[in-house]
Image (spheres, rainbow, N blue to C red):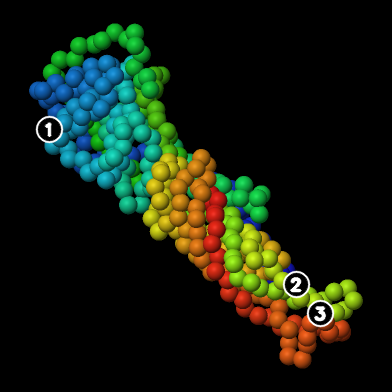
Amino acid sequence: MRYFRNSIMTAVMLALVSSAFAQDQVVVIPQPVAGAPTAYVDQANLFAKAYHLFRDGFATSAVDSLKKLLDNSGIKLDLRNYYILVANFTDGATPIGLLHEGSDFFDTRLYGLRDAKLYYIFLSRSHATSFTSTLLTAKDSPFMQALPQFLGLVLPYISPGMKVQELQPDTTWIDMREYEIPAQFQKFSNISVLVKAELPAERVLATIILDNTSKERWSFGVATAITSVQDVDFSIGDDGVIRIQPKPRGDLASFAVLNYNFQPVDTKARQLATSFHLLGGMRLATVIEPMLGIGFGVPVSNFEVHLFGGYSLEFAQELKSGFVVGQAVKEDPFKTKLRGKPRFGIELKFP
């Protein structure tokens, strides 16, 4: 039975680890949306205002000016999607960032592109369009990246000295494009964006690397439990005599567990908030003892400390009818007994 259990666990772990090394790359070019690029007469001079605000360090106000410019031009943004925004004030001053609800302009985190779209917007007074190339690199989830370790256990974007260029009210070009992200890059990938005025140009206007890491429901951990149930174990001594061995009242038991979070968790930006999850696993011992329970806790550094409560089933040995303690035997006197135990304790949860 023990050999069978170890074989199953080994096969599962090897399958998980083997999938952790698969990595693909692809270059994608966003396609223009209908009507793009468009020319907009910026009577309020919002583009110039944004330039000076960026230069003076007021990035939030600068982004608000660019959002207002887009809105006035007739482009309505749905910030449930992601927009890579490039503001080409001059070829030497071209900040790039991300527009998304709840995110700062210079945040580089995406949380999956299955339910959200990715767009590219280029604003300029000098260039109607731009050359943009995007490299997608598939990667493993934090769960898979941390799995080998677990198995081992059980912007200064504008130069301060730059000369300020006066921007007068003028036509602002707005180029908007939409990405088609292949399925294998939608949940976990790095997105590297390169922007130039045109392909032959030597100067790179802007670059950004976006970390597309979806929130996760799965994690794993090591749980240590104590039970107050008074149990005994039967064994056969070297002399062939059946013996009884009481278990200590505070039976300390360790389990390797797999967790399912009821709410997806951002494992790369943990917060001090309670995280409830379902956990299930197997005891780290020679006996077969699966466990199922509920846990909750708070993050600490690269792991989380959780309390949990649950119930385990131990495949224990019980004497067959006709055998007693102290009897010398030459045949197997045991039969399998399912023994249930309440389990409460502490879990170290990764990642």
Disc 1 and disc 3: Cα gap in Å? 88 Å
Instruction: From the image, tell me which residue sits under label 3.
Output: 242
> Which one is earlier in the sequence, the residue at label 1 or at label 3?
1
In the rendered structure, the answer to whether residue 203 lies left or right of residue 6 reads left
Name the residue: 63% across, 63% down.
250
* Figure quadrant of residue 130: top left
Instruction: From the image, tell me which residue sits under label 2.
Output: 245
Circle number at residue 72 = 1
How many numbered discs, if any? Answer: 3
* Figure quadrant of residue 268: top left
Circle number at residue 12 = none
The N terminus - image quarter? bottom right
Find residue 86 and report its horizontal and vertical position in percent. 30, 28
In the rendered structure, the answer to whether residue 74 lies left or right of residue 210 reads left
Q: Amino acid at mark 2?
A: Gln
Q: Nearer the viewer, residue 56 or 310?
A: 310
* Mark toward the viewer: 1 or 3: 3
